[in-house]
Amino acid sequence: MARRYDSEAVRNRVLSTSVRLFLERGYHGTTMAAILKEADVSSSSFQNVFGNKDGVMYELMKLMFSEQFSAADSAAALLGPNASPAFAYALETSVQLTIAELSEIIRDLYLQAYASERSLEYIRRNTAKHLQKFFQQYNPSFDEEDFYQMDIGTSGLMLGFMLRPCDDDFPLDVKIERYLQMSLSALNVPAEERTTIIEGIKQQDLRSIAKAAVKQLFDVLSDTFDLELQAQIFGEEECDKAFDIIKETVESLS
């Protein structure tokens, strides 16, 4: 019989279990029944906190994208005073596209975030704030709502490019250049500046940056869900398994 827990305990147990199962089986390969069984929570407790599996993905997505937005802010802060403010956006989105090519399971998680109406609204609203920060000078009359409406288009572009895996006919460097040309043009970055930004992105070791970003995300997940503390609840064997899956996922990107 499933145990009873308060809502915060249920949240932590379900999220830490879901991280492991999503990495091991993918989002679509993870059933509600598997989450309930391995987290050892009742269906009613789960529904009270998350509603459904999409609610779990929403909570994980917020953590994923908060890290991404934070990384973009850090990148912008490191740029010199004469650097294009659009470069931080170009780097962030290029890394995001690169991460999706590193692992099909990670691509699946990104696609699910963009496919969920609730998650996508969160992404758009928060991306709009960053678009305003990076692109206000190119669109002086725009307010945050205008940038939100622009992101309806640019997030659609991101989803479309993520959906199409790279191959010999469509390598990653071409995918990134196409995306940046279209998104930066839509955001009114002048053609000459777009060219400079794209050339600058080509000089970056995007795969190494993407792998480091994934590792940092997994470190945050481990810290957030305090897997060592979870061992006291789940047992050492179950938490060792979670650490092993995270480690294998990171190593598989090498």
Image: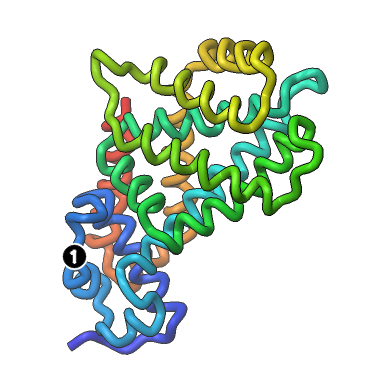
Query: Looking at the picture, how far across and down is residue 52, in whole percent?
Result: 32, 73
Above or below, comparing residue 158 to residue 246 in the picture: above
Query: Looking at the picture, how far across and down is residue 81, in whole percent?
Result: 82, 22
Examine the rendering and report whether any part of residue 120 can be seen: yes
Q: Is residue 60 left or right of residue 32?
A: right
Residue visible at 71% across and 43% down in the picture: 132
- Quarter where residue 135 is shown: top right
Residue visible at 38% across and 68% down in the picture: 55
> In the picture, which quadrant includes the N terminus?
bottom left
Amino acid tagged 1: Thr
Classed neighbour count for the residue bearing mark 1: other residues with Cα under 10 Å, few (<14), some (14–19), many (≥20): some
Examine the rendering and report whether any part of residue 227 can be seen: no
| Numbered disc total | 1
Assign a secondary structure to mark 1: loop
Residue visible at 24% across and 14% down in the picture: 168
Pick the residue in front: 158 or 204: 158
> In the picture, which quadrant includes the C terminus?
top left
Pick the residue in front: 176 or 5: 176
Q: Which residue is mark 1?
A: 31
